[in-house]
Amino acid sequence: MQPPFIRFGTWAAHDYHYPSNSLIITSKGAISRGWIDYLKIKNFSIFDKVEPNPSIETVEKIISQFKNENFSSIIGLGGGSSLDVAKFVAFKMGKKKIMIPTTFGSGSEVTRISVLNVDRKKTSFHDEKILADVAIVDPTFIEGTPMEVIKNSAIDACAQCSEAYDSKLGNPYTKFLCNTAFDILEYAILNDKFEKLALGSLLTGLGFGNSSTTLGHALSYVYSNEGIMHGHALSFTALVAHRFNNSVFYKRFESIVKKLNFEK
């Protein structure tokens, strides 16, 4: 299962022809970073207050604020938090969904999952109708991204594809996607070729989105719920889980964690 239209490549988000009268859902700073200008989109409304680890209350606030607007589509722009909110809002409002990641780790642009905080606990919502109609993955957004964001995004993607490869819900197709994704991500991280993360993250989303993450992610939520960044938590919990499960990725994942040098 994947979006019916996936566009990948440098300038992909810049060159796409967006429908008029859209609602862009993003985080603070999208305008100042030049993301909106880069899209060259016309005739739109914007909600730019998505927080890290977003809550279900943010979804409810957006729906309440724009319930009388007849948008043609909802565009999610940003990291996994913005995309998860945008997908869930569009799902609830019955609107076309266009997802554009600006960080490359969550794979949210191609999954049928939205992760939201409910009563201060991370909760995963799964539904085929959450899946985007259009996913646009443009490596250009990696330019100027702070290293801390790159690190947390990259390790998330590495954890997702390696966990999903080991998942009992996997199949030869998802294992192929996840193994290929890990190869790309590993090369990108160990050789500082961060522009390659975009493709690795996309393949990761297609792989784990059609199987599942496993113990590493389950353990990480304990720390994410306490305010620790998701990727930072995964750098430890996924490593412990891979060792416990005797994963074929354990040593390779360990090398990546050492390269990214997360604080203990």
Image (cartoon, grey):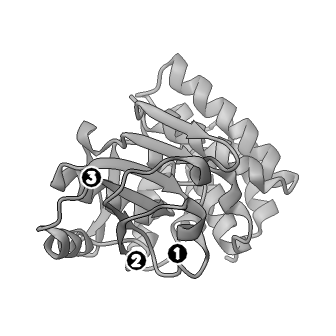
Looking at the picture, which amino acid does disc 1 mark?
Ala
Which x, y percent locates residue 238? 57, 53
Image point 24% across, 59% down: which residue?
89
- Could you tell whether 116 is left or right of 169 in the image? left
Q: Which residue is mark 2?
A: 48
User: Do callouts 2 and 3 mark residues in contact (Cβ within 8 Å)?
Assistant: no
Image point 20% across, 76% down: which residue?
61
Specify which label sits upstream in the sequence, 2 or 3.
2
Residue 213 can be seen, yes or no: no
Residue 147 can be seen, yes or no: yes
Which x, y percent locates residue 253? 71, 49
Which x, y percent locates residue 248? 68, 34
| Tag in front: 3 or 1 | 3
Residue 120's label in the rendered image is: none
Q: CA distance from mark 3 to mark 1?
A: 21 Å
Q: Which residue is mark 1?
A: 30
Q: Split into 4 quadrants, where in the image is the C terminus?
A: bottom right
User: Do callouts 1 and 2 mark residues in contact (Cβ within 8 Å)?
Assistant: yes
- Regarding mark 1 in the picture, which secondary structure is present there? loop
Looking at the picture, which amino acid does disc 2 mark?
Asp
When asked about the image quadrant of residue 183, the answer is top right
- Regarding mark 2 in the picture, which secondary structure is present there? loop
Residue 72's label in the rendered image is: 3
Specify which label sits upstream in the sequence, 1 or 2.
1
